[in-house]
Structure formats: C-alpha cells, structure tokens
Amino acid sequence: MKAQLKDALGSGLIVIGLAFAWCGLVAANDAIFQQFIVTPYASLIYLPAALRIIFPLVFHNAGYWGIILGSFGVAQGKVNDGTLDVALLAISSGLAPYIGISIFKTLFQTRPDLVDLKPVHLLALALLCAVSNAVLLNMYFSMSGRLMQPLNNLLTVLIGDILGTVIVLYLASFILTFFISRRRG
C-alpha cells in the first residue's frame, strides 16, 4: 500500500512539474516570439510543441497529463472561453501527441527505449503531432461554430508547431553534444 501511494504521489508530482514546465515555455514563447502570435491559439513559432513529443516519450502517461494540466492553466489566462471550452482545448492539446505518437509507432519500427531514433524519426514525430494538433484545434473550432479562416488557422498551427519543435530539438541536440564532448575532453 505504501509503495502504491508513493508511486501515485511521485506521478502526481511529475505531472505538476511538467505542467509548470509547459506554462513556463508558453510564457517564454509568448515573450520572445510575440510578433509571431496570430491568435491566442496559433503562433508561427510555438516552442512548447516540442514538449508534446518529449514529455510523452520520456514520461509516458504522466507526459500527456502534464500537457493537459499545463494547457488548462495557460488557456485560462489567455482566453475568455468558459471552463468547459478551456478543458476541451487542454484535452485536445494532450490528445494531439497521443494520436501523432500512436501513428508514428504504427508507421515506424523503433526500439521501445527509443535509442534508435534518427533525425527522420524526429521530423516524422514533429509532423504527425503538428498535424494532429492543427486538425483537432480546427475540429474544435468548427464544432463550436467559431472557425474563421480554417486554412489560415490550420497552416499557422502546423507551421508554428513544426518550427517550434525543430528549434527546441536542435537546441537540445546542440546542448547535449556540447556537454558530452566536454565530458570526454
């Protein structure tokens, strides 16, 4: 019983930590790339999109829940939608990577520990998660009767998610390579 409680508390703390990380990267993205924000829901550069790949691959289900909780917190502060709308948007933000990663696992044969991921795999993950997010977001706005300029919105989210993911993954790769090479030298 104690082990189960300890595991549950640990998972809960991971989810909360991931949610804070999500909120922090969204705030940093908004501050740095303010001129690229098209709507409260779409930006031409969206760095947190990389977390949609990283969190679930590293933290599994806690990663999806961290995205949902973080998205809920961010959306409440950015839009004047009701709580149900904010919750649906947050859930779609966590569901998008689930769909993208599930499709990726169907299309590509990689090891469960993901050690064999190549740049083409990362690009495929970025594209699949970006498409899933853009489609889910447009579906939500269409069903709620608030879809305006669907192609513009779809392309903005798609471009923003892909650019944000590529930027973060490139920086992470650069930083890891730098520290690994310094340790060896």
Image (cartoon, grey):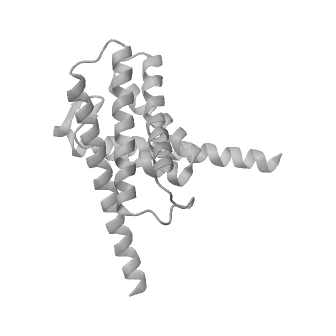
- Residue 176 position, x and y percent, is 39, 69
- Residue 157 position, x and y percent, is 28, 35
The total number of labels drawn is: 0
> Between residues 71 and 115, which one lies in front from this camera angle?
115
Q: Residue furthest bottom?
A: 185
Image point (37%, 13%), residue name: 144
Image point (33%, 11%), residue name: 145
Q: Is residue 111 above or below residue 53?
A: below
Image point (24%, 28%), residue name: 153
Q: Which of the 4 quarters of the picture holds residue 183?
A: bottom left
Q: Which of the 4 quarters of the picture holds residue 170?
A: bottom left
- Residue 154 position, x and y percent, is 27, 31
Q: Residue furthest left?
A: 35
Q: Is residue 54 left or right of residue 26?
A: right
> Between residues 117 and 90, which one lies in front from this camera angle?
117
From the image, which quarter does the C terminus lie in? Answer: bottom left
From the image, which quarter does the N terminus lie in? Answer: top right
Q: Is residue 32 left or right of residue 134?
A: left
Q: Which of the 4 quarters of the picture holds residue 92?
A: top left
